[in-house]
Amino acid sequence: MCSEAAQVSTEQLIDELRAIAGNDGERVNTIEGRETAAQYARRVKATLVEREAKEREQRASAMEELKTVNLRSHSGCSRGAQLLCGALADGVLTNSLAIAAALTDQLVSRAVPPALPAAADMSAEVACAHEKASFHLLESAATSFLREGDGGEAARTRACLIMWLGAVYLNVFVSSNWTGPPMKDLSLSPLPWHRHIKAGASTVVLKGGVGGDGSRGDGEEGGNAVQKALELACKQSLEVDSERFYRGAAAPLYLRAALSLLVLVPYGPSAKESSAPATLAWWGARALGTQQRLLLGRSSSLHSHLFALWDEAARHMQDRWVA
């Protein structure tokens, strides 16, 4: 009897192992209430298809509403901020990125974008100059946008929108390098004049600036050269205290954008400091901490700035807790 019980137990174990391995074979796991690996896979796939369809519907609805949103008005800022915050809260990164891209396009729409050089002209010096000009333009546009708020609720809404833009771009960078899964059709950067360059793409078709009518096909080799040059220039700009930034990092221009919006943009002098969101220091610390982790050595400058932000975030949390 003992040997028979042991044999049954062994056969059941084999059934379970086959189910876990995804190989049902000729034997089917007949344990009541347990599904086979194939059944589980079908159920999961059906759930994913249903969820993705719902996410696409939500994204399409938000993008349609964004067509009527004007960030120059307080009501437009409020609605744009609500849509972005809702997408962040849902945790659907593709949706929040699509909304953030549309809002960023409006944010920089008044500025004249730097011309994207052709692959043949993309030297290291040209790439660094273009990268620097691009993010200087983003920071200037965000600063002007914050200053246009007339104080009170309008200023707080604008500050929240800029902070959430930075949060989305930080999440994209973290997803691309740590948490995954890799995002499909991810542009090289969140800036509209880089929209035609796909991060990691084997072929890239570049167009002559924002709104350019004529396309300039540099081909696979040229497109890769532009991408690599801009990413290298960005990684060099992320170096601090002569500490080299990790060259294998993916989507570095998203971290650059996050730092620009969360750390480098002045949210206002002392008269307007009350308009800065309570969680701004926390998001800024996350962005700086991510940059610090990807330096090959520790930067004392970032260390000091990082802990100053953590202290500020702790004070905000303590004040809110006491209140």
Image (spheres, rainbow, N blue to C red):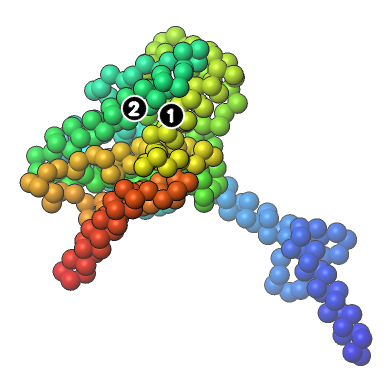
Horizontal relation, residue 311 to residue 45: left or right: left
Report if the CB atoms under discs 1 and 2 are less than 8 Å apart: yes
Q: Which residue is mark 1?
A: 233
How far is the residue under mark 1 from the one under mark 2?
A: 9 Å
Q: Which residue is mark 2?
A: 132
Please report the residue visible at 73 percent of the width from the left and 60 percent of the height from the top.
37
Above or below residue 141? Residue 56 is below
Horizontal relation, residue 72 to residue 256: left or right: left
Q: Quadrant of the N terminus?
A: bottom right
Please report the residue visible at 26 percent of the width from the left and 40 percent of the height from the top.
264
- Which residue appears farthest toward the front when viewing the image? 242
Above or below residue 23? Residue 241 is above
Q: Amino acid at mark 1?
A: Ala
Please report the residue visible at 28 percent of the width from the left and 44 percent of the height from the top.
263
- In terms of sequence position, does the residue under pointer 1 or pointer 2 come before the other? 2
- Which residue appears farthest toward the top when viewing the image? 214
Q: Quadrant of the C terminus?
A: bottom left
Residue 185 percent coordinates (x, y)? 52, 33
Residue 62 percent coordinates (x, y)? 36, 39
| Secondary structure found at label 1 | helix
Q: Which image quadrant is residue 269 in?
A: top left
Crowd rating for badge 2 (residues with CA inside 10 Å; few <14, some 14–19, many 20+): some
Residue 94 percent coordinates (x, y)? 46, 42
Above or below residue 137? Residue 292 is below
Q: Amino acid at mark 2?
A: Lys
286 or 97: nearer the viewer: 286
